[in-house]
Amino acid sequence: MPDGRLYDTDWYAWTLEQAAALRRMAETRVNSELDLENLAEEVESLGRSQESALVSALTHVIEHLLKLEHSPAPAPRNKWMLSVVEQRGRAVYALEDSGTLARRAPDLLPKAWKQGHRLAVKALELFDGVAPEALPTDCPYNLAQILDDDFIPANRHGLD
């Protein structure tokens, strides 16, 4: 019987481990009164929701870093800065809570980049007239920069 420490130290890993254990039980037909396969799916989805929350936070940080770097508009900068601080906090919290998720974070960055880039491109084009081609096609920020409270890219229009 597991001692439960993983539940307290790396909840994401715990959900993956428990889902795998439930699937093994389902294969051997242990305790057939439980719907083990669907139970395993539900436990696994709990872990995926933590992963999804991390991708969402990274997406918003990337979106607003791009806006801070490429927008010529001074007015929304404070709002974007606050969003970056808030979403960085959410991302760091998720990563500190799970070493397994922290190890997966570099693999999740391309998904967050794709979504954050798409949002920034549309908003900058719509509100600021910035051509989509003006933004990079590859992520110019590494994970450490995305999570670093002191990192804000220089604005290309000279704004502070």
Image (cartoon, rainbow, N blue to C red):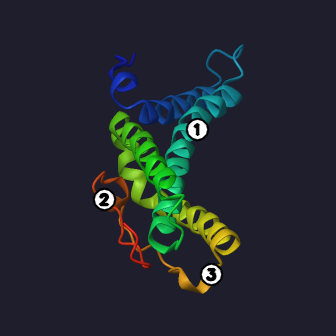
Report, in whole angstroms, how far the alpha carbon at label 3 lies from the one at label 2: 26 Å
| 99 left or right of 157 in image | left
Amino acid tagged 3: Pro
Q: Residue under circle 2?
A: 144
Residue type (three-letter) at the residue carrying disc 1: Ser
Q: Which residue is mark 1?
A: 49
Q: Dividing the image into 4 quarters, which one contains the N terminus?
A: top left
Q: Quadrant of residue 151?
A: bottom left
Image x and y of residue 48, in percent: 57, 41
Q: Provide the residue designation for mark 3.
A: 132
Q: Earlier in the sequence, mark 2 or mark 1?
A: 1
Residue at 35% in and 53% down: 147
Q: Earlier in the sequence, mark 3 or mark 2?
A: 3
Q: How many marks?
A: 3
Q: Which amino acid is tagged 2?
A: Ala
Q: Residue furthest front?
A: 75
Question: Element under label 1?
Answer: helix
Question: CA–CA distance between discs 2 and 1?
Answer: 23 Å
Q: How crowded is the residue under tag 3: few (<14 C-alpha within 10 Å), some, or many (20+)?
A: some
Q: Residue 143's spot in the image, x, y percent?
A: 36, 60
Q: Residue at x 40, y 71 (%)?
A: 159
- At horizontal 48% and vertical 57% (from top left) the residue drawn is 108
